[in-house]
Image (tube, rainbow, N blue to C red):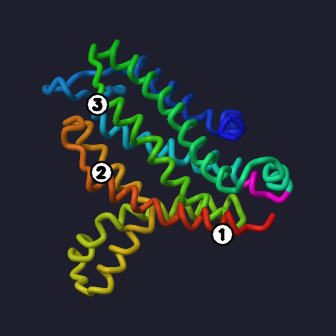
Amino acid sequence: MIRFISRLLLKNKVLWLWPLLGVLLVLVIALWGGVRTTVSSNSFVFLIGKFSIPAYVMMFQTLPVITIISVIGLPKHFSESIGRERAALIFSKSVSRTDFFLYDFASVLIITLFYSLITVVTFAILIAFGAGIFPIQYYIGALILIPFYVLAYYISIVFFIIVTDSRLVGALLGYFVTGFSSFLLHGNELLKDLNISSGIAHQAVNVFSYIVPSVAGLQQLWQPILHYGFSNFDWNLFGFIIASCIPFFIVSYYLMSRREF
């Protein structure tokens, strides 16, 4: 089943934009800029024309592009698979709904890891030739962050596709609701800045921060890895991120197991 879903994802031409745009960006940097190390040999910047872009800024600028491509391309196979005709064909074989649900997420993780690897290798070649360095923590961090970042969005999208029975509505709701995690992660500080001391408001922020998959937490987890390596890995934040993804995942599985085809 993983092979079947992975083939569907690899045939999705929208997702091809991910590695293609990565290669295009590397070519632009190579032709009209370069890579330069900073005072600290552990850090580096990308040069494009007159602009100097730190490595972590480049990473966070490319993440939204990868996310949008994934939000558009990834839901297609799942939405079609739970349609009556294809679902009847899939579940008429020796494939349970549990197998399909788990294998689907496993396939998405494998394919996003594959495209992340292509992106990382492309940038690694550029950085090695341009600056003569090999920042291993940058590459390992990217291979960890990007697939799970996309997967966090995908968990929400699957939930809303099942609830609304619409690929478009599910993708839009999943994208915007998951993006709201940025507010939830720092919501209590924002409420204090706004002089909102209501206990109910603070409690609501705390509750919803554990319901909406925290892509903002993944971004925050990435920054110290880029600068200091994995010695400063925040395990508490990592646990919070995992916990925030569980509610949508469990409810989606329950709804999927009860769905009639």
In the picture shown, does residue 199 fall above or below 22?
A: below
Three-letter residue code for mark 3: Gln
Is 114 magenta? The answer is: no
Q: Is residue 197 above or below residue 55?
A: below
Q: Earlier in the sequence, mark 1 or mark 2?
A: 1
Q: Is 147 situated left or right of 136 in this image?
A: right
SS of the residue at dot 2?
Answer: helix
Q: CA distance from mark 1 to mark 3?
A: 39 Å
The quadrant in which the N terminus is found is top right
Query: Residue drawn at (40%, 17%), measured in percent from left and top?
Result: 125
Cα–Cα span, label 2 and label 3: 15 Å
Residue depicted at x 33% and y 15%: 128
* Relative side of 237 to 166, left or right: left
Query: SS for tag 3?
Result: helix
Residue located beneath label 2 in the image: 220
Read off the residue under disc 1. Answer: 163
Q: Is residue 30 above or below residue 101?
A: above
Q: Which mark is residue 137?
A: 3
Disc 2 marks a residue whose amino acid type is: Gln
Q: Is residue 163 above or below residue 126?
A: below
Q: Secondary structure at mark 1?
A: helix
Residue 227, how many percent across, how many down? 21, 36
CA gap, disc 1 and disc 2: 30 Å
Q: Position of residue 77 (x, y in %)?
A: 71, 47
Report whether 194 appears left or right of 79. Answer: left
Locate residue 169: give its quadrant: bottom right
* Magenta span: 79-84
Dot placed on the residue nearer the N-terminal end, 1 or 3: 3
Residue placed most toward the observer, 142 or 49: 142
Q: Which residue is at 83% across, 59% downward?
A: 84
Proximity of marks 1 and 2: CB atoms separated by less than 8 Å: no
Mark 1 or mark 2, whichever is nearer to me: 1
